Amino acid sequence: MLPPAYEAKKYEDKIYKTWEDTGAFKADANSDKPPFTISMPPPNATGVLHLGHSVMLALEDIMIRHRRMKGYEALWLPGTDHAAIATESVVIKNLKETEGIKNPRSLGREKLIERIAQYVEKSQDTIRSQIRKMGASCDWSRERYTMDQSLHRCVNEVFKKMYEDGLIYRAERVVNWDVALQTTISDDEVEYEEKEGTLYTFEYLSAKQTGDKPLYVATSRPETKLGDTALAVHPDDKRYQHLIGKDFDVKWAGGQMINVTVIADHTVDMEFGTGVVGVTPFHSKTDYELWQRHKAEIKADPIQVIDEDGTITGHIKGYVGMTVQDCREQFVEWLKKEKRMKSEESYPQQLSISYRSKQPIEPLPKLQWFIDVNKKTVSWNGQLMSLKEVMQEVVRAKKITIIPDRFEKTYFHWIDNLQDWCISRQIWWGHRIPVWYNGDEVFVGLDAPEGDGWKQDEDTLDTWFSSGLWTWSTLIDPAITEDNTLSLDDLFEGSADFQKFHPTQMLETGYDILFFWIARMILMTTYATGQIPFETVYLHGLIRTREGKKMSKSDPATCIDPLDMIDKYGTDALRMSMVIGNTPGNDMRLYEEKIKGYRNFTNKLWNASRFVLGIFEEKGISEEPAIDTENLTDADEWIIGKLNKTIKAADSALTDYKISEAGQVLYDFLWNDFCDWYLELSKGDKQNTAVLYHVLKNILILLHPFIPFVTEEIWSHLPGAKGMLIHEPYPVPQNEKYNHVPITRLIDVVTKIRYLRAENKIEPARKIPVIIYAHAKTNELKRNEEDILRLARVSELTLQETGEKPDKAAADVVHGMELFIPLEGLVDTDKEKERLEKEIKNLEGYLKGLKAKLGNKKFVENAPDAVVEGEKKKLEEAEEKVEKLKEQLAQF
RNA sequence: GGGCGCUUAGCUCAGUUGGUUAGAGCGUCUGGUUUACACCCAGAAGGUCAUAGGUUCGAUUCCUAUAGCGCCCACCA
């Protein structure tokens, strides 16, 4: 016999182990079943499981279990990401702090990589065991890591292919330099932070120089003006027409000499500042582009003011080696001393911050590798397109669907603004760029060419370059990737998994990585494989605190630790709580009471099962009994009908990825239909074990994707259940003819009696006589007389078609049936009278509205017949009810 | 500056071809030792569906504007 409370801890790990050990999660590439594949978004190999992972794992596990039960060859492929910058900086920090190594890079490239790899190996185990804790039914035999040899091969092959197609090129550009981490980052990794800054306006050119008035320039970064090469004005700006095309020597503090040419460009805003922009090509992307457009007119060459380490370069006299901040302060001092500072106003500034280090980024000119997103060399559907165009095309043509669809707009908008993607990073942890140099010679390939003197590029690839291949690089057979004579196409053809499982069906992840990852996968995969990476993208929202705040690692009080919650309430409860009320694209608040609520739900299922299993034991049931359709009560038919409806609703909701809706339907069915009514109705002596078995069995199957552990445990106690629940096929409705109206009416009668009892303060334990004049429904109620006696605590039930109205009884009307509780002395007659009057008044208001509606010609003419008929019926019923209530009132 | 979303009961949220007197869970209140479950049972109270217009026989649902909150994008130096 099952214990009275479900203790998740006792069962979960054991059940997971059995699933895994018996290969329940394993997909078969040779099966005839249609594939259903989800590539698990790989958590960072260094990470610890947080709620973001939990919600992803819960949603994906529900999807995959549902499809597995529906007869698909379901593959959920797990793995981890080497998370280049994130991992390297964590390890460097650890080395500094715990081992006292001041400059971990001094260990040398090989040694440092080794240390990082060791660290990763350790933390991978953590994340793996935590994924298991969530009950994720992923195929561990296919686990991949973005640094696996086979994935490395794919990375190199794609790089080479893109290089040969001219889509990857090397160029000097102004890029985003993360001073703290000493590497470039991509445009998408730059965040903007609003900060109170100062706008300095100062005299740039004297009146003598302009031959007119002094020329003022406004800037928030005065120090960069030490390296200006031009002054830009709007072509229509009347104030500066006479200066356009001229150039001036400017002598700054410390003896720094520059030459600036005045250029005209439409991008300059006449209204802002003085309408003049100092152009520093090497420290601003905008300025760089300005310079590119006007290169020919500008006399001076660009000057690099700031160095990689964030200090002033040797090109700036008087400030060499200073920090940017010091340089700014001193230069401002100098301007003031020279009486050239006109104003200093505070104004809100958009500070560029690195997503990785959270430190300011410095735009710097650097020689880097880029992916060209505009070059039309990609063949797609027989047309030559650019990478951008393919990315747009697959979503526009609905080859890929994004849920919710509003994110498609966001996606298109992002592509419209997309510029060439900087893919090289100056860190050591990652896929090293497969390019070799020997003097002026450049070679792109897996290994260095024959001969001496070849040196590999020092840089590594952006981590998203490799994760962009995730849906398919994980399906390439590692056994064949060692063979370097094979082409990329050979690798596709030779990999059974790729052939069976790609394109994948579902990519589920948080909307915050739509650009970083989803878009990159579409870009990389359409190009490399000629296939889309996935058919559907499901974007879940962020988990927030009860107050709606972001949970942040730096403020542990705001965080809920999923492992804590699992420990306290069980995995199933956590899963339910994260999935119900969670709709795609919308953030969701999670708090402990909610999780507790779903713990109660798992316990409810446990106890309902305990009850049913107890009946089976008592009656010696050892096999699934067959339902005798000739011998069903109203309640049996009702619950079968309800179950059928539930199966359909849950299945179609899950098929449409409406996870929350499916969960709610099942919650409601178990608690409100099965437990509150069917089990209560089964407490007499007319238990139908076959129906109980049928319904419980189906409940377990239906709930299994949501709460896999408790359902699997109960399943193991179900007499005659074969194998594990995880393998059970999804139910289909059976005996669909049953309608359940009699029981619906019975429920309303019982509820009404309970209501009258409560309203009239009749002690719950006391059994009372009840009179029902049920008119046409008399026979129907008679069949279930005993249930009314028991469920409504009735001592004596007078049930007949009609009769005399008793004096001073509590009374009401349900479905045209008249109810009376005639006990003198029990009922407070004044109160009951008042209650009746109130109800009549309420009904009359309702009637008035209905009559007005039906009296409205336009309504009758325009509304569909079914609606009009419905309203008429309502009117009839309400009128009849009012009439009866009035008669009852007359008894007082 | 551009774009997107949200606003429904005290709290957290559901609610799609526009048509029941708008729903759930938690909380609150009144009761409860009923042959599973107090992690429970029975009953109740609680909403002008942000505001103002419009379309319609009919609007929580569609349109427009406004307000508040939030998010994303962007070369006002």
Image (cartoon, coloured by chain):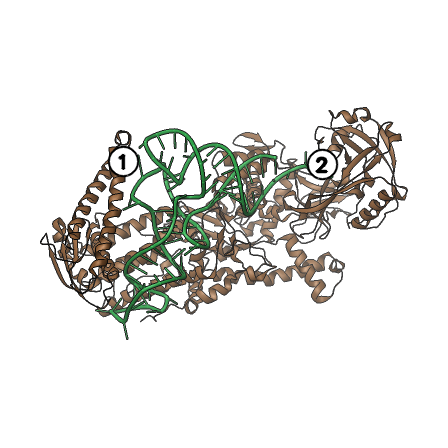
Chain colours: A brown, B green
Q: Give left or right: position of A882 versus A60.
A: left
- In the shown orientation, is residue A527 left or right of residue A113? left
Look at the image and tell me whether residue A353 can be seen: yes
Image coords of residue B51 (percent x, y): 45, 40
Residue A669: give x, y in percent of width and height: 31, 55
Q: Secondary structure at mark 1?
A: helix
Judge left or right: residue A857 versus residue A552: left
Closer-to-camera residue (A569/A703): A569
User: Are the residues tagged 1 and 2 within 8 Å (C-beta)?
Assistant: no
Query: Residue under mark 1: which chain is it in?
Result: A
User: Upstream in the sequence, badge 1 or badge 2?
Assistant: 2
Circle 2 packing at 10 Å, graded few (<14), some (14-19), many (20+), is some
Q: Which residue is mark 2?
A: A286
Check the image and report above or below for A677 versus A525: below
Residue type, mark 2 in image: Thr
Given residues A100 and A791, the one toward you in this image is A791
Q: Looking at this view, name the residue that lies furthest to the right.
A: A255
The furthest residue to the left: A803
Residue A565 image point, x, y percent:
48, 63
Callout 2: SS: helix
**Chain containing the residue with disc 2:** A
Q: Which residue is mark 1?
A: A853
Establish if A716 lies above or below A262: below
- The three-letter amino acid code for the residue at tag 1 is Lys
Observer-nearest residue: B37 or A203?
A203
Please report the residue visible at 19 percent of the width from the left and 49 percent of the height from the top.
A815
Q: Do discs 1 and 2 share a chain?
A: yes
Quarter of the figure with the N terminus of chain A: bottom left
- Residue A172 seen in the figure: no
Residue B18, horizontal then vertical, whole percent:
35, 37
